[in-house]
Amino acid sequence: MENIKPKTKRLFAQAYILGGSPCSGKSTLAQCLSRKFKLQYYKVDNHEKAHAKRCDPKLHPTMSRYATLSWNEIWMRPVVEQVAEEFEYYRERFEMINQDLGEYDDKNPLILEGAAYLPELIEQIGADPRRVIFIVPTKEFQLQHYRQRPWIQHILQACADPEQAFENWMRRDHLFGQEILRQAKAKGYKTILVDGSRTVAEQYAQVTAYFELKAP
């Protein structure tokens, strides 16, 4: 974590961060927090295409290789390989995220949301632990809600074995989430396991209370 600009450090020091794994409700919570508390909102997923165009094969080998793979090549590989690659992908991408954040106002707090905010990266950049939460779904909750997303079928139909591709995809995200939980707990960060027993409103209240947010 080199050459981090002072402004970026200030942004992270006062930012509220929702990390974790996919299908845990992070985006919904971040949107609500942004509207209610007048926070700037940076959603990592919205910048994926732009980051892919900016990657340099020498500096971002994992990102560059990933961009050349078909859906079949992505999801039919060994799951353990996929998980390791996902972590490396986010490590390479973090520099681009920091560059993006340089365009934001450092006098107005941000809500930062996305799986790219790995516990190890958040720790290195000096984010306030009291403003960081990692949210991960249970395997059952993840399966239930992923199947409801219509765009997934378009991806799976491009694979030689759609059912096996979906199983690999779900196993990758589950194992990624479990490792995120392990790292976050080891570093003392707040974690939330989403199993469907709480409503979105209850989760929102839990996050708001932990962040000690008050309406402007």
Image: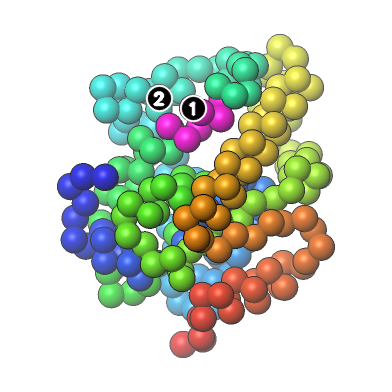
Q: Residue furthest front?
A: 186
Q: Is the magenta stretch mostly helix, strand or loop?
A: helix
Q: Residue under circle 1?
A: 85
Q: In this view, does 129 lie to the left or right of 79?
A: left
Q: Position of residue 211 (x, y in %)?
A: 51, 75
Decide: few, some or many residues near mark 1? Use Cα within 10 Å; few <14, some 14-19, many ≥20. Answer: some
Query: Which quarter of the image is occupied by the N terminus?
Result: top left
Q: Is residue 3 visible?
A: yes
Residue drawn at point x = 75 percent, y = 15 percent: 161
Q: Can residue 44 be seen in this view?
A: no
Q: Position of residue 110 (x, y in %)?
A: 40, 67
Q: Residue under circle 2?
A: 62
Q: Quadrant of residue 112?
A: bottom left
Residue drawn at point x = 35 percent, y = 43 percent: 94
In the rendering, which numbered label is found on residue 3?
A: none
Q: How far apart are marks 2 and 1 (CA)?
A: 7 Å
Q: Does the magenta stretch include residue 151?
A: no
Q: Is residue 167 left or right of residue 80?
A: right
In this picture, which residue range is highlighted in magenta? Answer: 82-88
Q: Under tag 2, what secondary structure?
A: helix
Q: Where is residue 107 in the image (x, y as percent from the top left)?
A: 28, 75
Decide: few, some or many residues near mark 2? Use Cα within 10 Å; few <14, some 14-19, many ≥20. Answer: many
Residue drawn at point x = 30 percent, y = 21 percent: 57
Colour pattern of the rendering: rainbow
Q: Do the residues labelled 2 and 1 touch (CB within 8 Å)?
A: yes
Please, what is the three-letter code of the amino acid marked with disc 1?
Answer: Glu
Residue drawn at point x = 18 percent, y = 47 percent: 3
Q: Where is residue 191 in the image (x, y as percent from the top left)?
A: 60, 60
Q: In this view, does 122 lie to the left or right of 157?
A: left
Please, what is the three-letter code of the amino acid marked with disc 2?
Answer: Thr
